[in-house]
Image (tube, rainbow, N blue to C red):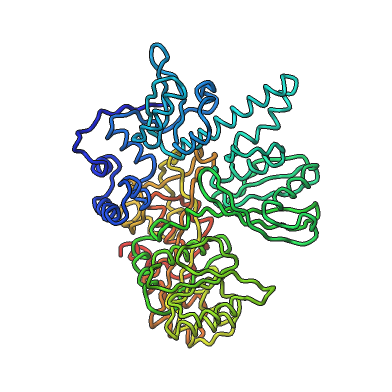
Amino acid sequence: MNLLAFNQVPRHERLGAILCKQAGLATARLDEALARQREEGGRIGQVLLALKAIDEDQLAVALAAQLGLLHARELPKAEEVDPALVERIPVAFAKQQLVMPFRREGAAGDCVLVAVADPLAVHALDDVRKLTGLEPVPVVSAPTRILELINKVYARLKVGVELGRRGAAAAGEGDEEYDAEELVDILDLTDEAPIIRWVNSLMFQAVKERASDIHIEPGEKDVVVRYRIDGALRETKRAPRQFLASILSRVKIMAGLNIAEKRLPQDGRIRRKIAGKEIDMRVATAPTATGERVTIRLLDRTSVQLGLADIGFAADHLVALEAIINRPHGILLVTGPTGSGKTTTLYACLSTINAPDLNILTIEDPVEYQLEGISQTQVNPKIELTFASGLRSFLRHDPDVIMVGEIRDVETAEIAIQASLTGHLVFSTVHTNDAAGGVTRLVDMGVEPFLVASSVVGLLAQRLVRRVCSECRELVTPTVEAISGLGLDPVRFFAGQIPIIGVKGQLPMPLGKVYRAHGCDVCLSTGYKGRSGIYELLMLDDEVRSLCLKKADATSLKRAGVRAGMRTLRLDGANKVLAGMTTIEEVMLVTAEDHAPTEHAPAEHAR
């Protein structure tokens, strides 16, 4: 663990100025934060975090620099912390104040290094001094890192006490039994059942590794647990088959399901606070030939706070999309397969325009995230509350904006179109492979082409690509074939003549170079960490509307869009490659070859 000591900056140097110098904070973003601080109060650092202008590590470095304190980006491992330092510190106090003593210092060992998130909370340091009898030396670090260390240290402390009570004879058995407990975030619970701890550990580890889904699958001899991380499945745990019934019962109890029903699929929800974050989990069970399986979808509420720029929209797409969502009426359709991030995009659109003077209603299946200030309804076929019936009811509630989770049938489509024609803005999704396919899908459902042409404003197709890991990525020179496969002109690429359309988080790239995934401990040896969207935005201009009225096929519509300057999914992926966000292999994997003409690609990139 490296500790950095900072010389105290001049007293007149404010935190915002330090962040501008050290973290590259834009002056405009600082002014925005100061304006919000004047309206709502609070510390400027917390306001900047809420605006996502900086991250926790940047704030910790700046605070340490301002106050002349030590800073630690990485804290020690739990096993490196002396239990004697923390056994007198109540876990509730440590979590509430975000303080963690971790190492003795000084010639006489009368000082202790204390990880702190808020170095100005001197009362917490005073309490540490009284509890330990040592002089605390504050070390500024990010709150999430401190909380993670607290969880692990107190888990080990609890395991040690329990093993001591059981005696050395049971120690070997206890190690295996309590292996999962080290990962459990809810350490204040008194549940001692190993199955409860094992299930809790699955959820904690899934949140820690940024998994979107947990799959609990019964095999002939084992119960296999797999996490879906950044779109890829990875096996993480196994348990003996004999524990399957207990594991299923525990999950069902947490989700409020019927534990006696094993023949029919069931759906439920779990809400837990894990690692300081409120996590909603959607649980689905299904009978299989080898027994019931469970899939748990993890819904992190913090992802709802993402803006359109945060989910990968380039500057030109951002301008066009904001123009659409600020229209008084019309339909925006988001297309793509399941798991391509359509719901997140729609939520980002709603969050962008959400204001007290707008009446926004949604009908979803299911309601994945709850948005403040927006009325959300979940479909329920058992009582005949469908997308169509809910949408029809919404029109009697004087809405300004309506979101329909999915257009599945002609009835829903026609009501949505009528809503847009009578002065409402409608957001929805359809399952098609590209943007142009959304038009033909509506026509195939039975919607009249003139209704589609007069109501739909734009169609947004999207996919998710994995971001290349910033810790282990490698710069390489791509082959001519690889650049051609992206739809780019190799001559212009190697000459550096293809400008990058601005993307939040883009990196300066050397001439003729791209990143390649490698793999390290940070990214779990995958070479990727996190995901971003790639997009294809088809605006319905006069030519596209004319083709729509003639019932033209999707390829003709796509060609018209490309002629008007539309960037296809693969070309937008190429833009992300040029911006240093992902790799050529990842873009080629998630996009299909563009059948529309691509000779406009270089000119389009230079727009």
Write the residue at 74% across / 44% down.
223
Q: Nearer the viewer, residue 465 or 45?
A: 45
Q: In percent of the image, x 54 and y 39: which residue is there?
A: 525
Residue 291, image x, y percentages? 79, 52
Up-down relation of residue 339 to residue 115 (above or below): below
**Residue 96 in the image: above or below residue 131:** below
Horizontal and vertical percent for residue 141? 40, 34
Give the image location of residue 266, x and y in percent: 72, 61
Find residue 268 and report its image quarter.
bottom right
Q: Is residue 209 visible?
A: yes
Nearer to us in this view, 368 or 91: 91
In which quadrant of the rendered image does the C terminus lie?
A: bottom left
Q: Which is more toward the observer, 323 or 231? A: 323
- Camera sees residue 559: no
Q: How many marks?
A: 0
Quarter occupied by residue 57: top left
Decide if residue 531 is on the left or right side of residue 382. Answer: left
Percent x, y of residue 548: 47, 83
Q: Quadrant of the N terminus?
A: top left
Q: Is residue 283 above or below residue 398?
A: above
- Determine the residue positioned at 49% across, 34% down: 93
